[in-house]
Amino acid sequence: MKKKVLILGSGGREHAMAWAFANDDNVSKVYCAPGNGGTSKIAENITINLANFQEILRLAQEKKIDLTVVGPENPLASGIVDSFQKEGLRIFGPDAYGAQLESSKLFARNLMAEKKILQPSFYSCNTRDEIESLKVILELPLVLKADGLAAGKGVIVCETDEEFEKALKTIFEDGEFGEAARRISLERCLVGEELSVFAVCDGENFIILNTAQDHKRAFDGDNGPNTGGMGAYSPTPLSTPELIDRVGVEIIQPTLDAMKDRGHPYTGFLYVGLMIVDGDPYVIEFNVRMGDPETQVVLPLLESSLFELLWDATEGNLNKSKVAVSSKTAVTVVLAADGYPGKYEKGMKIKGLEKVQDRLVFHAGTLQKDHDIISNGGRILNVVGFGKDLKSAIDDAYDIANSIEFSGKYYRKDIGKRGVQYLKKGSKK
């Protein structure tokens, strides 16, 4: 019997999930709460406040939802899984205790230290004086991380004294991160190649879906302010079978074991952000949900049923599951509003979508207004290109990007460039 799925969230990640479920033979109906202009084409959007758990529970009960999947981190950190479980409703994601792997940097760091998982050296700090004293001993470059959730912007890399002083002002004088910065994780800055690994976990077992590389900075050449992500590609050239095996054995399994030992078996997506230093995987961060925009390249390469995978995870049956992944490469380029991640305009009419109906375009900050799709956020669309290799996938993605128009359209022109350079460097060895 086919099942009903509810997706919580409104971004490109949630549109990618809705797309995967809408094309899944196990699924009869997809609901998105609140969804966006793109999800409205393939699912039923329901306007809802994601902080109102009672309203979400009532929705799941009224619509007889078989499986709820949580997109963003805030509902997980606030305990939506705990609320669903109390009502006997099936939901995929970690409880509030498990969500601390993302919602508390120091919780994650201490757990990794306990399990001897490779990570940069770190220090828990409560005051400006503590940080300044440690800086004298440790020397730059250093990384300052707000312990709590700060919408992906609570990390500051300090390479110079000027940057260090500016970071302290941002945290302690301007209070930019608010309560999230009550504690600070002061960390040594690692230098290497970045890589993200995405896994589905059932409390004891895990399956790695794929790897991806995000592009956080707003401007070409990895310049400008941090954003939610301006593009991504999957898989990455760094992801050898040997490295992925190490990530599973040395990082993911010990983390699941630690959570189980603490009485909170971890079920949900696990995003492992890595820095590869001299061939060794160091954990930069954990996220307890899929990345955005990485989901938009990871899920289109999944050839197995996403529904079956997540259902098996909620049953604790991942040891019986297998996944098939395409041998292609996928690249997504984010089309953003001019000014993002700062101030930007909304309400721009998006043109050209009819030209790319046979291509993959995930919506993020969009709304359906009468017969038009209009912009309603900073990151507006994610165009996804495919190819037999990274270069051809990049070309495909930019071909779509150039076909869509709206006032103030901005996008990076170098998504995937570092991956291509890495491949060229490797071919010369």
Image (cartoon, rainbow, N blue to C red):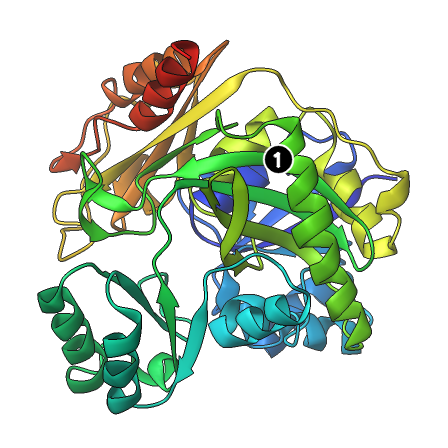
Quarter of the image that includes the N terminus: top right
Q: Is residue 113 left or right of residue 332?
A: right
Question: Residue 144's x, y, as percent?
Answer: 31, 70
Q: Which residue in the protein does label 1 denote?
A: 243
Q: How many marks?
A: 1
Residue drawn at x 72%, y 71% is 84
Q: Amino acid at mark 1?
A: Leu
Residue drawn at x 52%, y 59% is 119
Residue drawn at x 22%, y 32% is 412
**Can you say whether 194 is above or below 205 in the image?**
above
Quarter of the image that includes the C terminus: top left
Other residues around mark 1 within 10 Å, as few (<14) / some (14–19) / many (≥20): some
Question: Residue 70's x, y, as percent?
Answer: 59, 58
Looking at the image, which is closer to me, 37 or 224?
224
Question: Residue 418's x, y, as percent?
Answer: 32, 27
Looking at the image, which is closer to me, 288 or 360?
288
Q: Is residue 249 left or right of residue 414?
A: right
**Tag 1, which secondary structure?**
helix
Q: Residue furthest left?
A: 162
Q: Residue furthest front?
A: 137
Q: Is residue 67 left or right of residue 133?
A: right
- Tell me, yes or no, if residue 43 can be seen here: no
Question: Residue 374's x, y, as percent?
Answer: 26, 41
In the figure, residue 401 lies in which quadrant?
top left
- Tell me, yes or no, if residue 412 can be seen here: yes
Residue drawn at x 81%, y 55% is 314
Looking at the image, which is closer to me, 142 or 256?
142
